[in-house]
Amino acid sequence: MQIRSMHFKGRASAAAADRVLQGKLATAKGLFVDGRRRAVAEIDLEATREASQAIRNRAVAHLDLWLERFEQEATRRGGQVLWARDGAEICRLVTDIARRHGVKKAIKSKSMLSEEAGLNAALEAAGVQPVETDLGEYILQINDNEPPSHIIAPVIHKTKEEVADLFARVHQKPRKTEIGEMTREAREMLRTHFLSADMGISGGNFLVAETGSVALVTNEGNGRMVTTLPRVHVVITGVEKVVPTLEDLATLMRILPRSATGQSISNYFSVLTGVKRPEDTDGPEHLYFILVDNGRVDLLGSDFQDMLRCIRCAACMNHCPVYQTIGGHAYGWVYPGPMGSVLTPLFVGIENALDLPHAATMCNQCGVVCPVKIPLPDLMRKLREQQVERRLRPWGERAALKLWAWLARHPSLYAFAAKFGVRYLNWLAEGGDRIRVMGVAPSWTAGRDFPTPEGRTFRELYKTRRNE
Amino acid sequence: MQDSRADILGRIRSRLGRTAENAASGRVEIEAVLARREQGPRPAVEADLAARMRVRSEALSSTVEEVARLEDAPAAVARYLAGLNLPSAAVAWPQLAGLDWAGAGLQVEGRAANGDDLVGITGVFCAVAETGTLALLSGPDTPATASLLPETHIALVPVSRIVTGMEEAFDLMRAECGELPRAVNFISGPSRTGDIEQTLVLGAHGPYRVHIVLLRDC
Ligand code: SF4
């Protein structure tokens, strides 16, 4: 997917002014946030978060050994394990597999890695028709390959009217306005693809080292279709997705759907192991796993290793006030919200996504809800530090900080500046307790007031107290 | 291809500070984790698993009824289908094809489902009371398509096969199957989507309705 993260500010401002978008985000927020709150009340949330964190840490701590074990088991069951360093390699491997098996049409269930790699374009170029089958992803695909704006609710930014227009135009059928009817129409369009595709491409929520299986979570049933009907199944997942045992899977499944959509369990949870057996009447004859690095390995042993625990539940964005205001497109790449603000710079280069680690109020809502306890605000702060260390901040900011550092090393000058500053702010407030327009930086007060300092400076107060 | 594997695993090893010695102790550690099969925290589930199964299934928009024996199932299925004006032709797991479906006025074929089948009848491997979930294993006598392609899925669930949680379901699979079949499908209600305006719609790509027939004495 093309990276547009450098245009964050402009796109975020436009989105922040879009009242219709915020209406949609507010509805979704209500559903996801309230739903999660109800669903997590059924379990011992903190204990389950601790356990989930421990499971993911265990996997990451011996990642090489777990992957070797996974590979051994998956191979023993008839799967073939391939490895991809980056998006280009994913595309090459998948198109090679398609060619080898004479594939004309590939049905896809949601895979974020295929978005990272821009796989659909590569398939088309290789003469294979890719069909997205998750309803949201399908809507985006027929709308000229529009990018998703949320990792589990990809068309959260669209109204049903927009979808109705799109369906009428693309499907060439009478326009429907009822959501149930629209869903039925998409079901019928996609059924023919399900039944005629030669290859299924899926992501994987988890890989199980114990059994060499991939675990797939969906609600629509498209994941099951994609992995049951075509004769070839290709799984594309990040190398960090491995977990040790089936028990670990059971624990994570208590917290993933609850954190994601507020469901106690997703509709379909499939644990898939190996190829169709000779006596079976359904299932794929060929199974490939593509285990992908694309920036993940470099996080091991770094300040950002915690991020490898992520189970892509989207709770962090559902609870983020910044995401709530601007939606997902402004983030400019595959992953929006707090997890995207951390992952995007790490995956595409810190210099290509300078604004993202700053797109936060540091309220730590994300850190509190994250089911695997990733300290997202801390990671954003570390990215900010790296920007400073690598001199990637704008010259104005750097100059201002230099000036401040110089002042701070000259106590009497600092005292004078502070005194002057306080007087200036009091003058701006015109006797009130709020400053409506900040003289030197008016944009600071464009959407909020600035509180007036309380009387004198700290130093002045200190001096008087000591004298008393 | 091979060099990508070597490259990725090599970089993982070097970033983890892997040496010959800690690889050996690491292997011992992962074997211990695999042997321990440690469980996470479990929510309380009441002792009456059938009652819990019923309540949770209904909360997932499935419908539930109870009969005594497997032989009572065809009549129950026929009643259910007639009540909703659904067709009396169905596909069923070959495992169940021997029941007297014709005697209940149904035309049932035991085979994998195709895109034209409107009703699919299956059993279960077991069911999970904690969440009201059906666990189905793929196999020649239990094809996965029967619970997926038809618009209506009817599952016959022996009460003795209801277990507490997913952990017990996995244990049962290890005990009875040795290793996992190609597909373990945990099914929790009819397929659904909330993609358009986050409005819940039942019947996305899989069944529109799931009907559970509990078999009390099985
Ligand atoms: S960072 Fe945490 S909350 Fe956000 S998607 Fe990942 S696991 Fe979920």
Image (cartoon, grey):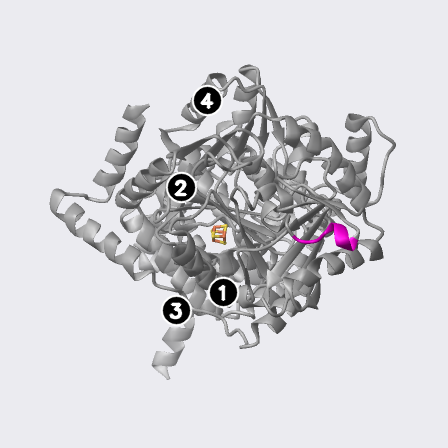
Disc 1 residue type (three-letter): Gly
Quadrant housing the C terminus of chain B: bottom right
Q: Are marks 1 and 3 in contact (CB under 8 Å)?
A: no
Circle nearer the N terminus (3, 2): 2
Estimate the spatial distance between the alpha carbons at disc 4 and disc 3, rounded to whole Å. 72 Å
Q: Is residue A457 visible?
A: no
Which residue is at the far bottom? A468
Q: Chain of mark 1?
A: B
Q: Residue at x 61, y 33 (%)?
A: A147
Disc 4 residue type (three-letter): Ile
Q: Nearer the viewer, mark 2 or mark 1?
A: 1
Using the image as rendered, state which of residue A299 and residue B85 is in the foreground. Answer: B85
The residue labelled by disc 4 is A97
Q: Nearer the viewer, mark 1 or mark 3?
A: 1
The residue labelled by disc 2 is A398
- Element assignment for label 4: helix
The residue labelled by disc 1 is B165
Q: Chain of mark 2?
A: A
Q: Residue at x 36, y 57 (%)?
A: A55
Kindly indicate whether the residues beneath marks 1 and 4 are on one polypeptide chain: no
